[in-house]
Image (cartoon, rainbow, N blue to C red):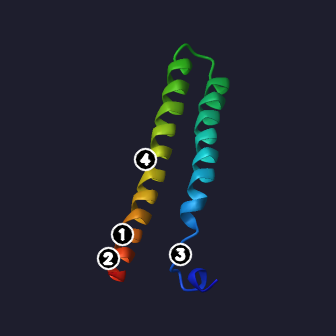
Amino acid sequence: MRDFLYFDKMITPKLILPIYWFLLLGAITSGWFFFELEFKVEPILLSVLLAVVGAVVVRVTCELFIVMFKINEALQEIKGK
């Protein structure tokens, strides 16, 4: 319990995976909604592009958060030596 109260152990890395899946679903859904709203020829390409770019942005953002926490873990390990 002390680890959580003094921020020695982080809970956010455990939350990143469910957040990633939720945001990925949101990116794909937004592409689908964009396709449903437009009535031109290009919406198919734009909606697929929106879904793919959204998925990549979500993935990169979550990876950056994970890297930050891995750096923190490594620094804590170095500090303990």
Q: Which labelled disc corresponds to residue 9?
A: 3
Q: Which labelled disc corresponds to residue 74?
A: 1
First of labels 1, 3 by sequence position: 3
Quarter of the picture holding the C terminus: bottom left
Work out how far the residue at label 1 is from the one at label 3, CA to CA, in angstroms.
13 Å
Which residue position is annotated with label 4?
60
Q: What residue type is labelled 4?
A: Val
First of labels 3, 4 by sequence position: 3
Work out how far the residue at label 3 is from the one at label 4, CA to CA, in angstroms.
24 Å
Percent position of residue 80, x then y: 36, 82
Q: What residue type is labelled 1?
A: Ala
Q: Viewer-nearest of labels 3 and 2? A: 2
Counting other residues with Cα less than 10 Å from the Cα at mark 4, is it few (<14), some (14-19), or many (20 or more)? Answer: few
Callout 2 touching callout 1 (CB < 8 Å)? yes
Q: Viewer-nearest of labels 4 and 1? A: 1
- Considering the numbered disc 4 on the image, is that residue within a helix, a strand or a loop? helix
- Considering the numbered disc 1 on the image, is that residue within a helix, a strand or a loop? helix
Work out how far the residue at label 3 is from the one at label 2, CA to CA, in angstroms.
15 Å
Which residue position is annotated with label 2?
78
Residue at position x 41%, y 55% in the image: 64
Residue at position x 56%, y 82% in the image: 3
Who is closer to the viewer here, 32 or 80?
80
Q: Viewer-nearest of labels 3 and 4? A: 3
Percent position of residue 72, x then y: 40, 70
Work out how far the residue at label 4 is from the one at label 2, CA to CA, in angstroms.
27 Å
38 shown above or below 77: above
Q: Which labelled disc corresponds to residue 3?
A: none
First of labels 3, 2 by sequence position: 3
First of labels 4, 1 by sequence position: 4
Residue at position x 54%, y 86% in the image: 6
Q: What residue type is labelled 3?
A: Lys
Counting other residues with Cα less than 10 Å from the Cα at mark 1, is it few (<14), some (14-19), or many (20 or more)? Answer: few
